[in-house]
Amino acid sequence: MILEAVMLKVKAGQEKEYEEAFQKASTIISSMKGYISHELHRCIEVQGKYLLLVRWETLEDHTVGFRHSAEYQQWKKQLHHFYDPFPTVEHFLECNLDVTQ
């Protein structure tokens, strides 16, 4: 499993519209091959700041399957105009640490 993590900065005053658009666009990403789950978190301290976490089966499911799809173009059209600056996307693997020691 791959965790995609994106810190998003939404343009001032557009937070409500962004959240509504994101809810609608969620059906796009959730229909993609390799998609597991996603969640959007609003920052308490900084207005307009969000954290998006998406779980994918493989890195390629996101970087190739989603990013090179017609569905991504719809996602982009619905959401990308809200961001300033445009976000950096990072991918993570779980460390599987033994925390019982």
Image (cartoon, helix red, strand yellow):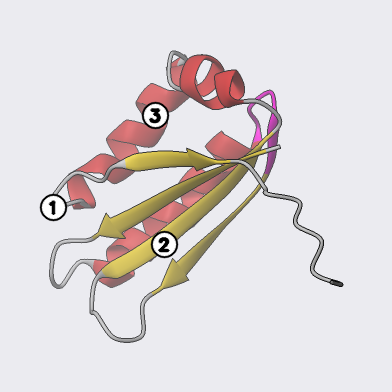
Name the mark nearer the viewer: 1 or 3.
1
Where the C terminus falls, by quadrant? bottom right
Residue position for label 3:
74
Q: Quadrant of residue 70?
A: top left
Does 84 sit above or below residue 17? above
Residue position for label 2:
51
- Marks 2 and 3, the one that precedes in the sequence: 2
Which kind of residue does numbered mark 2 sit on?
A: Leu
Q: Quadrant of residue 68?
A: top left
Badge 1, how many Cα within 10 Å: few under 14, some, many 20+?
A: few
Q: Residue at x 32, y 60 (%)?
A: 18
Magenta stretch encompasses residue 35: yes
Task: Name the residue at the front extreme.
Answer: 101
Which kind of residue does numbered mark 1 sit on?
A: Asp
The span from disc 1 to disc 3 (Cα, nearest Å) is: 19 Å
The span from disc 2 to disc 1 (Cα, nearest Å) is: 14 Å
Q: Residue 2 at x, y = what percent?
A: 63, 37
Name the mark nearer the viewer: 2 or 3.
2
- Marks 2 and 1, the one that precedes in the sequence: 2
Magenta stretch encompasses residue 30: no
Left or right, residue 92 beside residue 12: right
Which kind of residue does numbered mark 3 sit on?
A: Gln
The local secondary structure at tag 2 comes to strand
Which residue range is magenta in the image? Answer: 31-36
The local secondary structure at tag 1 comes to loop
Residue position for label 1:
84
Where the N terminus falls, by quadrant? top right
Does 69 sit above or below residue 79? above
